[in-house]
Image (cartoon, grey):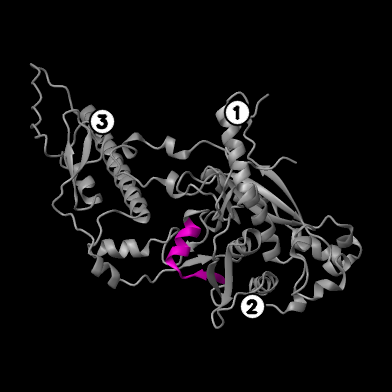
């Protein structure tokens, strides 16, 4: 079965936004440089080999021999530190440098005081006047407010135009010479039309001055050019230079919050993270982490004897590891009613292309050997068409493709791996994960007028 490969999805939704919201925006950071690495690992590839170019052959041979004599490591000298929080059922990264590394190189975790990117310190410094630039959350909030106010104003103007047209149609015709309509007062270029006056509906193609002035910070001035375009110019009067002493007084109260799946992938899959307890700073082994994650993934927590091969955490991690290995940036999809969202490069570059729902599948003959097992499997696999249509309708409204990720559940590991699985500190995690299989099925709405032969 073919897998989902990044870059083979829908187009960037930012290209479909109105041009009024795409122009005259403040310059953004260079995300291609900030997020150049897809994972928190250093990559040392060989240069391209061009056989008919002698310099290319020499440079390739030199690089190959150098890396053969002096091996280059892809990992850092010291691993990143984190600790497990059983109360919040997550893993916390309190070091700001480590949090920045994990976010910029793979978009792992989220700020506990932010929507996504850890930006509480920047917002606090901007609130106190230490910096002028806007954070990503403030930019998003401002753009949504601009769109909301612009749509309200456009709807009000259209309603006034319709009412004016209906009123003119009801005016009786009077014999006599036609009178010239009164000329509309001229509006200076440095002023905008009052909101209460009626005028051409096309004048609302650009937001009003009052709206732009209220949406931009005090350090910007909105001016209208000769061609009618709105320009946002820095006034230079309200610039506040960063005071290093005052900035140091602000304590960063935000930390990076990792899910159990992200923490296990960084620890077991990449080997760049060490997780310890809040009481003990000693890092825990991967087997111990896996056991704690499985126990704490339930509410309330379960005992070790109650853990099964179809634990919710194990199924979720298998799917997370699967799509991360294929190059996707995997983020939580709880706000869209799904398990995961798949981004091509990351949330700062484009919207998520696919929404993933995890479904356990009990195809192994072990699960149908007895009537009791078959009844239990039917309850765990049961989904209604109403549920599926509701979820797919939501994904269609937000322009995402629904992916059903079926995970084939193996029988209890005691029948496959023997009694060694009972020793949670010695069993092989790789052998356990290889007993699972992931099948991807893309589900789309069938629309007759778009699906004709």
Q: Secondary structure at mark 2?
A: loop
Residue occupying the point 23% across, 27% down: 169
Query: Gap in Å between the C-alphas at discs 3 and 1?
Result: 58 Å
Q: Position of residue 318 (x, y in %)?
A: 69, 58
List x then y, in percent, for residue 59: 56, 35
Of tags 2 and 1, the one toward the viewer is 1
Residue under label 3: 202
Crowding at dot 2, Cα within 10 Å, few <14 / some 14-19 / many 20+, comes out as few
Mark 3 burial class by Cα count in 10 Å: few <14, some 14-19, many 20+ = few
- Sequence-wise first label, 2 or 1: 1
Indicate whether 194 appears above or below 167.
below
Q: How far across and down, in percent of the image, does residue 381 sit?
A: 75, 58
Q: Quadrant of the C terminus?
A: top right
Q: Is residue 85 left or right of residue 422?
A: left
The circle on residue 408 is none
Dot 3 or dot 1: first in sequence order is 1
- Find the distance from the CA under tag 2 to the CA under tag 3: 60 Å
Asked whether disc 2 touches disc 3, contact meaning CB atoms under 8 Å apart, the reply is no
Q: Nearer the viewer, mark 3 or mark 1?
A: 1
The residue stretch that appears in magenta = 90-103
Would you identify the image quadrant in which residue 314 lies?
bottom right
What residue would you read off at disc 1?
50
- Residue positioned 11% across, 18% down in the render: 175
- Which residue is label 2 attached to? 300
Q: Does the image show residue 95?
A: yes
Horizontal arrangement in the rendering, residue 136 relative to residue 386 (left or right): left
Residue visible at 48% across and 59% down?
101
Quick one: SS at disc 3? helix
Where disc 1 sits, the SS reads: loop
């Amino acid at each position: 079965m073919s897998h989902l490969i990044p870059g083979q999805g829908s187009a960037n939704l930012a290209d479909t936004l109105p041009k009024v919201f795409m122009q005259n925006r403040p310059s953004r950071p260079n995300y291609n440089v900030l997020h150049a690495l897809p994972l928190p690992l250093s990559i040392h590839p060989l240069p391209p080999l061009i056989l008919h170019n002698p310099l290319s052959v020499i440079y390739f041979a030199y690089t190959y021999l150098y890396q053969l004599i002096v091996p280059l490591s892809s990992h850092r000298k010291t691993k990143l530190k984190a600790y497990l929080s059983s109360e919040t059922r997550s893993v916390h990264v309190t070091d700001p440098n480590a949090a920045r590394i994990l976010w910029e190189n793979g978009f792992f975790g989220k700020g506990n005081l932010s929507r996504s990117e850890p930006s509480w310190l920047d917002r606090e410094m901007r609130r106190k006047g230490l910096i002028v630039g806007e954070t990503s959350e403030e930019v998003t909030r401002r753009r949504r407010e601009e769109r909301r106010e612009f749509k309200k104003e456009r709807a009000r103007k259209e309603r006034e135009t319709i009412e004016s047209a209906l009123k003119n149609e009801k005016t009786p015709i009077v014999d006599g010479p036609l009178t010239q309509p009164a000329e509309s007062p001229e509006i200076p270029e440095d002023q905008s039309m009052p909101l209460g006056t009626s005028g051409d509906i096309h004048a609302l193609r650009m937001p009003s001055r009052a709206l732009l002035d209220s949406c931009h910070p005090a350090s910007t001035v909105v001016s209208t050019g000769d061609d009618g375009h709105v320009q946002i110019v820095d006034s230079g009067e309200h610039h506040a230079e960063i005071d290093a002493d005052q900035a140091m007084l602000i304590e960063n109260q935000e930390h990076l919050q990792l899910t159990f799946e992200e923490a296990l992938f960084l620890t077991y899959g990449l080997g760049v993270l060490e997780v310890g307890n809040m009481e003990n700073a000693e890092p825990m082994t991967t087997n111990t982490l896996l056991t704690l994650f499985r126990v704490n993934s339930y509410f309330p927590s379960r005992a070790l004897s109650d853990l099964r091969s179809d634990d919710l955490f194990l199924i979720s991690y298998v799917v997370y590891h699967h799509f991360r290995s294929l190059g996707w940036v995997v983020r939580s999809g709880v706000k869209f009613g799904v398990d995961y969202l798949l981004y091509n490069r990351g949330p700062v570059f484009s919207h998520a292309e696919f929404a993933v729902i995890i479904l356990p599948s009990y195809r192994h003959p072990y699960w149908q050997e007895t009537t009791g097992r078959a009844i239990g499997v039917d309850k765990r696999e049961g989904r209604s068409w109403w549920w599926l249509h509701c979820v797919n309708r939501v994904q269609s409204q937000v322009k995402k493709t629904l992916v059903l990720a079926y995970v084939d559940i193996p029988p209890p590991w005691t029948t496959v791996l023997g009694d060694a699985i009972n020793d949670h500190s010695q069993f092989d995690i790789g052998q356990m994960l290889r007993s699972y299989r992931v099948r991807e099925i893309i589900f789309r709405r069938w629309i007759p007028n778009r699906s004709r032969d």
